[in-house]
Image (cartoon, rainbow, N blue to C red):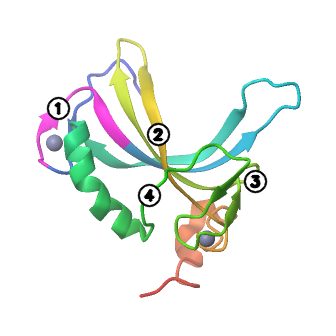
């Protein structure tokens, strides 16, 4: 990606064209490494994909329910933390955060001269392997088994 090109976006709620900051919703496959020596945990992120683009926090708050409904993932009342075990947004079962799992998060991204800088990252929901239909295993071919156990 050419980070020097001016980037513009269209808000998914109000259709306004804007440059920055970007209020983002991301779907990613993540896992968390915890260290015995008390170091801050590290997060491995793969297959991160922006699924929501908004011009403001309020447009994002308005758009989020429909966005997550399209993902068929309810937004939990208490957002997940980084683990080691969190609660699946769909079945309330345990999610082992140290193994790759489906994560939804939101953040604000400001594109500067040279790079984008994310801030105010918040986890929205995590989904266990059973509910994500094995997406963590076949993240590049979601369509293959996405229908396995999802209600129509
Ligand atoms: Zn907007
Ligand atoms: Zn689940």
Residues in magenta, as a range: 14-24
Q: Give the secondary structure at mark 3.
A: loop
Residue drawn at x 65%, y 65% as measured from the top left: 138
Residue at far bottom of view: 152
Which circle, 2 or 4, is nearer the viewer? 4
Q: CA distance from mark 3 to mark 4?
A: 23 Å
CB contact under 8 Å: marks 2 and 1: no
Q: Is residue 11 visible?
A: no
| Secondary element at tag 2 | strand
What x and y, as percent, mark residue 42? Answer: 71, 32
Residue mark closest to the camera, 3 vs 2: 2
Q: Tell which tag, 4 or 1, sits nearer the viewer.
A: 4
Is 17 colored magenta in this rendering? Answer: yes
**Magenta run includes residue 89:** no
On the image, numbered disc 3 is attached to which residue?
Answer: 99
Q: Is mark 3 within 8 Å of ligand 2?
A: no
For disc 1, the neighbor class at 10 Å (few under 14, some 14 to 19, many from 20) is some
Can you tell which of label 3 and label 1 is closer to the viewer? Answer: 3
| Mark 3 and mark 2 residues within 8 Å of each other at the beta carbon | no
Q: How many marks are shown on the rendered structure? A: 4
Residue drawn at (69%, 46%) of the image: 83
**CB under 8 Å between callouts 4 and 1?**
no
Q: Which mark is residue 122?
A: 2
């Amino acid at each position: 990606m050419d980070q020097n090109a001016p980037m513009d976006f269209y808000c998914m709620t109000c259709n306004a064209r804007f440059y920055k900051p970007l209020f983002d919703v991301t779907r990613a496959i993540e896992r968390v490494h915890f260290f015995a020596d008390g170091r801050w945990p590290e997060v491995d992120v793969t297959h991160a994909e922006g699924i929501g683009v908004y011009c403001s926090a309020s447009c994002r708050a308005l758009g989020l329910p429909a966005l997550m409904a399209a993902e068929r993932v309810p937004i939990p009342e208490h957002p997940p933390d980084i683990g080691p075990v969190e609660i699946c947004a769909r079945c309330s079962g345990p999610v082992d955060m140290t193994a790759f799992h489906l994560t939804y998060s939101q953040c604000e991204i400001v594109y500067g001269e040279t790079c984008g800088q994310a801030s105010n990252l918040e986890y929205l929901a995590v989904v266990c392997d059973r509910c994500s239909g094995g997406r963590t295993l076949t993240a590049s071919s979601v369509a293959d088994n996405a229908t396995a156990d999802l209600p129509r």
